């Protein structure tokens, strides 16, 4: 029989049995504790609310209703309904345990219909639910998703729902071991062997009367980094100054050409000629400043490499500034 037909038939059978559960109260009680009429009435009301939620598709909200009805009324109908609810909600491990509890109640209440249904679901879940076996050495404490894994569960296949499980092993005075186990939707029987975690390394102690020798290189490293920053800044400023100088020089040359007629200043162009001379002087001064800045930058660059481990590796600095059709390029290699 396929899984869908199994689900439909079990749902129909459960609905028929739950409808008939109202007439079975005293025979279903396994506990010696007396259930009062008020308890039975409350459990019956919770049972009906759970059935209504299940019928409307709110399975996740129906399960707590059945759980409370089972605890209050001690009835086998609520126990079976809770197992079916958890199965439909994807909580297969809980459902398997609850079907086994419901089977005990049904056998004690002489309900062969419920016994048959419980057996069918148990067989189906046992073919579906995965198991995880954790084997750990003596003295090693295991936690699963931060919850203690009791030693009585060691080397025992334990049903688990699909998902990721973080297994953490630790022991007094030893390092922690941790691994993540993935359980898929397809049934698997996984075994995890926890190793004997290694002892923690003993802390080192210095000999009495002798202070440990500590060498600091932070100052040298910081100084070298600072010189490297200054070198890059100086070279960048120098390259920019040379670019401005070249642009000003070209502009001065253009104005001087426009203001002269052969070897003489054109009539009415004396102011333009003087402006061209001033721009040429400024271009020369700016160019000199740029060259000085680049020279200083290279000096800083050389001293920074002397104090670093990278002094044997080539360094190339290529600033490029473009002004229209003119380009100034400075290339340096060490």
Image (spheres, rainbow, N blue to C red):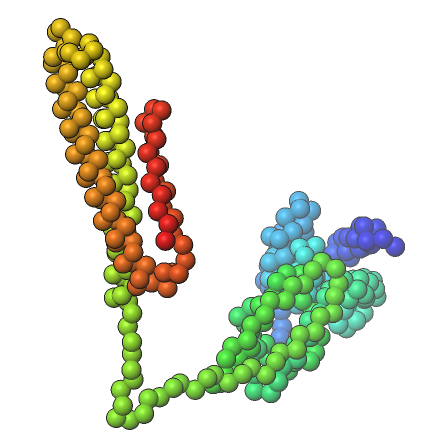
Q: In the orientation shown, which residue stands out farthest toward the bottom?
A: 208
Q: In the orientation shown, which residue stands out farthest toward the right?
A: 1
Q: Is residue 267 visible?
A: yes
Which residue is found at the position 34% from the left and 24% from the top? 324
Q: Is residue 325 left or right of residue 131?
A: left
In the rendered view of the protein, which quadrant contains the N terminus?
bottom right
Residue 264 locus on image (x, y percent):
15, 11
| Residue nearest the viewer, comparing 61 with 68 | 61
Residue 90 locus on image (x, y percent):
67, 57
Quadrant location of residue 19? bottom right
Quadrant location of residue 307? bottom left
Count of picture labels? 0
Which residue is found at the position 33% from the left and 63% from the top? 308
| Residue nearest the viewer, comparing 87 with 22 | 87
Residue 24 locus on image (x, y percent):
74, 63
Q: Is residue 172 left or right of residue 234?
A: right
Residue 122 locus on image (x, y percent):
78, 65
Q: Is residue 45 visible?
A: no
* In the image, residue 199 above or below residue 192: below
Q: In the orientation shown, which residue stands out farthest toward the front?
A: 263
* In the image, residue 69 above or below residue 265: below
Q: Is residue 91 left or right of residue 254?
A: right
| Residue nearest the viewer, comparing 75 with 92 | 92
């Amino acid at each position: 029989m396929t899984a869908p037909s199994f689900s439909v038939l079990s749902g129909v059978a459960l609905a028929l049995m739950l409808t008939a559960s109202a007439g079975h109260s005293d025979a279903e009680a396994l506990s010696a504790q007396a259930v009062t009429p008020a308890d039975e009435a409350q459990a019956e009301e919770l049972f009906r609310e759970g059935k209504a939620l299940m019928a409307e598709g709110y399975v996740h909200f129906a399960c707590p209703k059945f759980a409370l009805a089972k605890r209050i009324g001690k009835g086998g109908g609520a126990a079976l309904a809770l197992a079916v609810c958890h199965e439909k909600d994807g909580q297969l491990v809980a459902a398997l345990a609850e079907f086994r509890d419901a089977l005990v109640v049904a056998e004690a209440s002489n309900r062969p219909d419920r016994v048959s249904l419980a057996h069918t679901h148990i067989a189906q879940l046992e073919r579906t639910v995965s198991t995880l076996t954790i084997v750990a050495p003596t003295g090693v404490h295991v936690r699963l998703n931060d919850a203690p894994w009791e030693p009585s569960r060691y080397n025992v296949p334990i049903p688990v729902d699909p998902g990721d499980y973080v297994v953490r092993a630790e022991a007094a005075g030893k390092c922690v071991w941790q691994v993540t186990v993935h359980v898929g939707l397809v049934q698997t029987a996984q075994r995890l062997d926890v190793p004997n975690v290694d002892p923690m390394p003993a802390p080192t102690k210095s000999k009495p009367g002798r202070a440990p020798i500590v060498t600091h290189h932070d100052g040298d490293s910081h100084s070298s980094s600072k010189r490297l920053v200054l070198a890059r800044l100086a070279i960048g400023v120098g390259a920019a100054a040379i670019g401005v100088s070249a642009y000003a020089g070209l502009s001065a040359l253009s104005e001087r050409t426009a203001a002269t007629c052969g070897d003489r200043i054109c009539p009415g162009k004396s102011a333009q000629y003087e402006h061209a001379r001033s721009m040429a002087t400024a271009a020369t001064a700016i160019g000199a400043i740029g060259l000085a800045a680049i020279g200083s930058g290279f000096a800083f660059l050389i001293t920074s490499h002397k104090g670093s481990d990278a002094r044997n590796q080539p360094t190339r600095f290529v600033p490029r500034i473009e002004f229209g059709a003119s380009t100034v390029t400075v290339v340096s290699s060490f």
